[in-house]
Image (cartoon, rainbow, N blue to C red):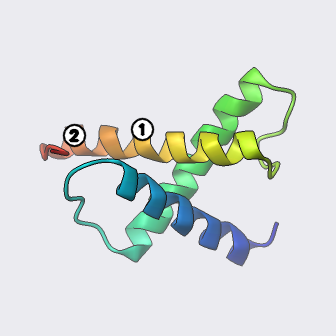
Amino acid sequence: MSILLFVVFGLVVGLIARAVLPGRQSMGLLATSLLGIAGSFMGGFLVALLTHNRVLDFNTAGIIGSIIGAMLLLVIASRFSGRSLA
């Protein structure tokens, strides 16, 4: 997967994670894309532990895991920043 496609995928995953979680998250497009990329790695790693897929494989379980990973990172970041999601 090319770097540009990976960044666009991270942006989409970050936007979905921000849309699913309630509350206001004040971050720009770059931070959203970094959130999605980090969530993709984290979710891909968790999916790789449960299935026989590799971390960087593009599949349905990886996409769902990426969104869940990004949502988890968003919750953790909101807890450390002192802001609530609701």
Closer to us: mark 1 or mark 2?
Answer: 1
Residue 15 is situated, as x and y percent measured from the top left of the image, at 44, 63
Q: Amino acid at mark 1?
A: Leu
* Depicted 5 relative to depicted 35: above or below: below
**Residue 80: numbered disc:** 2
Left/right placement of residue 10 relative to residue 48 reads: left
43 with respect to 24 (left or right): right
**Residue extending furthest toward the right:** 52
Picture mark count: 2
**68 to the left or right of 62:** left
Q: Which mark, residue 40?
A: none
Q: Is residue 40 left or right of residue 47?
A: left
Residue at the spot 20% in from the left edge and 45% down from the top edge:
85
Give the image location of residue 69, x and y in percent: 52, 41
Mark 2 surroundings within 10 Å by alpha-carbon count, few (fewer than 14), some (14 through 19), many (20 or more) = few
Residue drawn at x 70%, y 32% is 47
Disc with the residue nearer the chain's start (1 vs 2): 1
Q: Is residue 41 visible?
A: no
Question: Residue at label 1?
Answer: 72
Q: Which amino acid is tagged 2?
A: Phe
Residue in front for this viewpoint, 34 or 12: 12
Q: Callout 1: few (<14), some (14-19), or many (20+) C-alpha neighbours within 10 Å? A: some
For the residue labelled by badge 2, is the local secondary structure a helix, a strand or a loop? helix
Where 73 falls versus 58 (above or below)?
above
State how far apart marks 1 and 2 are (Cα): 13 Å
Q: Residue at x 33, y 74 (%)?
A: 28
- Residue 83, given in percent of the width and then of the height, sits at 13, 47
Disc 1 is placed on an element classified as: helix
Q: Quadrant of the C terminus?
A: top left
Q: Position of residue 51 (x, y in %)?
A: 80, 25
The quarter of the image holding the N terminus is bottom right
